[in-house]
Image (cartoon, helix red, strand yellow):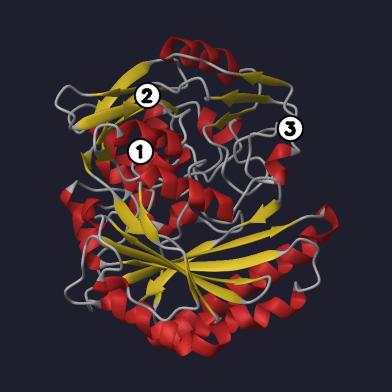
């Protein structure tokens, strides 16, 4: 089971692996499994925690053969299967001068990214889920639905962030847009010497009242050793645009294709290590950004001696232009309103990797303390946002509840309607659940 990002998932041994190739095969498999044994569903297998897309002693339904794709005659949409990886999708679309919002790493799967919301580089297009116009969807009963803004409207909305709580998507039909090249790459800096400049540059970029919507940025800091890395991205073939200038030590930016850029990102976080991720969000605020850096710096001592440790933290702006683009495409489930005070949000996610199982308790303890420290700081500063990105959440977090009580209640209602026997709540243990009361 090597086709997983984390060693935790790779080490699980299911009793059986199913690889359906069509909606009828998914339908038959679901009807057979729903009342007989526990099972897992795998698209790309890029979650950190054990059991997210694999299951010990049960049945893993691997969607890798649902790797179909087709572009509409007018090229306004593309239909893609959940077995594809984003590098494959970008390569396919590049031949037509097209793109869609998708995962940043070539090996991330289409399915989990789309169902979890999906942040992206493309500010003018909102979250990845906002760009889906139709789902071919298989219920636990085996029924196959065409889910759109006009048909099964409640399920259509629920699938925009509701994760794997309702059934299995056999295909996504997604809006495309023109893209004829990008500029971006990695810029390195010495964290301790330039931290004040870097944080100010990040905050100014995120909060620019005349935000350039072609521009996106991820700011990372890592231990092994302590180095900072900015990853600017510009959705036009324009070198070093003014919106993305920052102090730097080394520069690996270039004109590129989206597909090649995603392959480069894959190399930053390869398969084959034990993994831990968590996520939180807060307002763009200099005090909070400094508190985050201080918490990161304080966390390093406890893990510095761990074999194969990589300890990194990434921040990316969620500018109000991004949220407005999201709203234009209709409601998703994430519950992130534009800030009435005008400050954009910042998404922060961790990526911790290590080699030995014996170090797992130590690394997880340090990682959760780090999360607790920055959460407390943001709460005290009044900048913490409730939203937790389901695609990077730790099992101790509750991303579905973070969408707000009304959205969680809506998801629970949709679950009861389309999965009345609670197959995807009880028989599929992986993933984050909508929180139905136990009968």
Q: Is residue 398 left or right of residue 161?
A: right
Q: Residues within 10 Å of mark 2 (few under 14, many from 20)?
A: many
Q: Which disc number belongs to residue 56? A: 3
Q: Is residue 265 left or right of residue 38?
A: left
Q: Nearer the viewer, residue 154 or 18?
A: 18
Element class at badge 2 = strand
Quadrant of the image occupied by residue 371: bottom right
Q: Nearer the viewer, residue 191 or 312?
A: 191
207 up-or-down from 156: above or below = below
Residues packed near mark 3 inside 10 Å, few (<14), some (14 to 19) or many (20 plus): some
Q: Which residue occupies 28% across, 27% down?
A: 147
Q: Is residue 342 visible?
A: yes
Residue at 72%, 45% in the rendered image = 7
The CA distance from mark 1 to mark 3 is 27 Å
Position in image of residue 379 (x %, y %): 46, 80
Mark closer to the chain start, 2 or 1: 2
Q: Nearer the viewer, residue 204 or 233?
A: 233
- From this viewpoint, which residue is outermost toward the right? 358
Q: Tell which circle, 1 or 3, labels the residue nearer the N-terminal end.
A: 3
Secondary element under disc 1, as helix, strand or loop, is loop
Q: Position of residue 14 (x, y in %)?
A: 72, 27
Residue 68 vertical placement versus 7 (above, below):
above
Q: Give the quarter of the figure containing the N terminus.
A: top right
C-alpha gap between disc 2 and disc 3: 26 Å
Is residue 178 toward the left or the right of residue 435 in the image? left
Do residues under tags 2 and 1 come within 8 Å of each other at their CB atoms? Answer: yes
What's the mark number on residue 159? Answer: 1
Residue at mark 2: 137
Looking at marks 2 and 3 on the same chain, the residue that comes earlier in the sequence is marked by 3
**Residue at 26% over, 69% down:** 241
Residue drawn at point x = 29 percent, y = 64 percent: 239
- Could you say where residue 332 lies in the image, as x and y percent from the top left? 29, 48
């Amino acid at each position: 089971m090597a086709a997983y990002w984390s060693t935790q998932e790779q080490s699980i041994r299911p009793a059986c692996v199913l690889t359906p190739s069509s909606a009828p095969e998914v339908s038959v498999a679901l009807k057979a499994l729903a009342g007989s044994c526990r099972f897992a569903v795998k698209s790309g297998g890029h979650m950190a925690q054990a059991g997210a897309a694999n299951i010990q002693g049960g049945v893993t339904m691997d969607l890798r053969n649902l790797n179909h794709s087709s572009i509409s005659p007018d090229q306004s949409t593309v239909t893609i299967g959940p077995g594809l990886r984003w590098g494959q999708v970008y390569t396919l679309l590049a031949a037509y001068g097209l793109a869609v919002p998708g995962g940043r790493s070539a090996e991330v799967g289409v399915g989990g990214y789309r169902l979890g919301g999906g942040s992206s580089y493309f500010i003018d297009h909102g979250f990845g889920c906002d760009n889906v116009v139709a789902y071919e969807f298989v219920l636990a009963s085996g029924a196959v639905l065409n889910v759109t803004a006009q048909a099964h409207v409640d399920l259509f909305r629920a699938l925009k962030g509701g994760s794997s709580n309702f059934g299995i998507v056999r295909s996504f039909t997604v809006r495309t847009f023109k893209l004829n090249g990008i500029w971006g790459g990695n810029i390195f800096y010495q964290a301790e010497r330039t931290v004040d400049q870097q944080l100010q540059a990040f905050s100014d970029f995120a909060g620019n009242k005349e935000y350039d919507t072609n521009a996106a940025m991820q700011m990372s800091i890592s231990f092994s050793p302590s180095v900072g890395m900015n990853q600017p991205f510009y959705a036009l073939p324009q070198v070093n645009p003014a919106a993305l200038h920052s102090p730097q030590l080394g520069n690996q930016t270039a004109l590129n294709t989206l597909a090649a850029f995603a392959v480069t990102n894959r190399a930053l976080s390869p398969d084959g290590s034990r993994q831990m991720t968590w996520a939180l969000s807060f307002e763009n605020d200099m005090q909070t950004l400094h508190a985050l850096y201080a918490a990161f710096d304080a966390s390093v001592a406890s893990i510095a001696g761990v074999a194969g440790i990589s300890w990194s933290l990434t921040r990316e702006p969620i500018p109000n232009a991004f949220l407005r683009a999201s709203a234009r495409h209709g409601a998703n489930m994430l519950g992130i309103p534009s800030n009435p005070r005008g400050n954009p949000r910042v998404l922060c996610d961790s990526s911790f990797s290590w080699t030995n199982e014996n170090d797992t308790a130590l690394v997880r303890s340090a990682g959760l303390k780090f999360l607790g420290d920055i959460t407390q700081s943001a709460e005290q500063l009044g900048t913490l946002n409730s939203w937790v990105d389901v695609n990077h959440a730790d099992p101790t977090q509750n991303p579905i509840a973070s969408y707000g009580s009304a959205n969680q209640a809506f998801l629970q209602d949709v679950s009861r309607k389309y999965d009345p026997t609670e197959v995807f709540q009880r028989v599929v243990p992986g993933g984050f659940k909508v929180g139905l009361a136990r009968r």
